[in-house]
Image: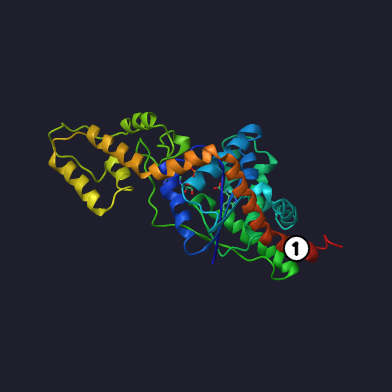
Amino acid sequence: MRVFTGIQPSGDLHIGNYFGSIKQMVEAQQNAETFAFIANYHAMSSGNGGEKLAGLTMQAATDFLSLGIDPNKSTFWVQSDVKEVLELYWVLSAFTPMGLLERAHSYKDKTAKGISANHSLFSYPVLMAADILLFSPEIVPVGKDQIQHVEIARDIAIKFNNEYGDILKLPEFKIEESVATVPGTDGQKMSKSYKNTINIFGEEKAQLKVIKKIVTENVPLEEPKEYENCNVYNMAKLFLNNQECIALQNRYKSGGEGHGHFKLHLADVIWEYFRPYREKREYYMKNQDEVREILHLGAQKAKEVASPMMETIRSVTGISY
Ligand code: ADP
Ligand code: TRP
């Protein structure tokens, strides 16, 4: 089975990203043929360009490799290193009704907020369709906000196939229902846009400062405390095994400790959990050429799939003559 995913290079990763998506991606490598790429062309539609984009791309590559994307198990590359995707994007544009894109919420939401859209934002779903259809995956794991984009890819593929035969494979999206939403420091969904994140690769002192800000209820030190709805407990349990969870619950129930103690514990748990990843990251940060080399080899592997598909498409559409 081929699993396919695209990652927007968007800066510092937080523990919501890790438990909501990266961990599953790393686990998927064990039993599926995994294709994962850094969507740097897509990032341009949100205004990231120039040196900033180059930096974000290298940061995403370094972070994902450090967190367990294994280039021997997965095909891992940067979107712009496989240019076939831009050619397919144009071909698919000819099979994309305007109405389909006008209904896309990524575009609709922004224009509804009065943000003026450029063409890349409008046509983003066509590029995403090209990303996917070039590689014929069975499964595209996505967050809820991306379901519509996979559906648009299917619609476009159906239109293309109606004209030229059964060439593009219709992808299925997969939502990881078991993945809970990770709360942020204020109790809302952890998200960069809410400024409530705990970053995976932050400095230890800065991380502790953020953890100390987690909103908790006000209960005197000596009294027992609720753990079920406690943001600190709900974060800690992501990192702990069953036994460790029960031990922490008992500390809440027995009183005598305040939320400050639980926050210190959480800070320790997070710091230790990411220690091996941090060490790997330090290595890759010192060896950025090695990261580039991995991406380069990944692009070559990706092209082995993308090139023959694009050849077929050129042939049936009459682009080759
Ligand atoms: P952000 O909201 O910080 O901008 P993104 O939208 O870039 O995060 O999310 C990238 C991936 O991480 C998505 O697959 C998303 O589902 C997952 N993710 C982000 N925040 C959370 C969270 N709080 N809980 C679970 N998963 C999350
Ligand atoms: N649009 C996706 C996001 O914002 C990233 C992405 C681009 C993607 N192309 C893709 C995801 C293809 C899956 C498949 O998160």
Q: Residue furthest right?
A: 321
| 135, 27: nearer the viewer | 27
Asked if residue 292 lies left or right of residue 242, the reply is: right
Q: Is residue 320 above or below residue 252?
A: below
Q: Residue at x 33, y 48 (%)?
A: 238
| 299, 131: nearer the viewer | 299
Q: Which quadrant holds the N terminus?
A: bottom right
Q: Residue furthest bottom?
A: 165
Q: Position of residue 115 (x, y in %)?
A: 60, 34
Ligand 2 within 8 Å of the CB at mark 1:
no
Q: Is residue 100 visible?
A: no
Q: Residue at x 38, y 57 (%)?
A: 178
Image quadrant assignment for residue 177: bottom left
Q: Position of residue 220 (x, y in %)?
A: 15, 31
Q: Is residue 137 above or below residue 253?
A: below
Give SS at disc 1.
Answer: helix
Q: Is residue 127 visible?
A: yes
Asked if residue 171 lies left or right of residue 63, the reply is: right
Q: Residue at x 43, y 47 (%)?
A: 18
What residue is pinned by disc 1?
A: 313
Image quadrant assignment for residue 231: top left
Q: Residue at x 68, y 39 (%)?
A: 118
Asked if residue 290 lies left or right of residue 310, the reply is: left
Q: Position of residue 234 (x, y in %)?
A: 30, 45
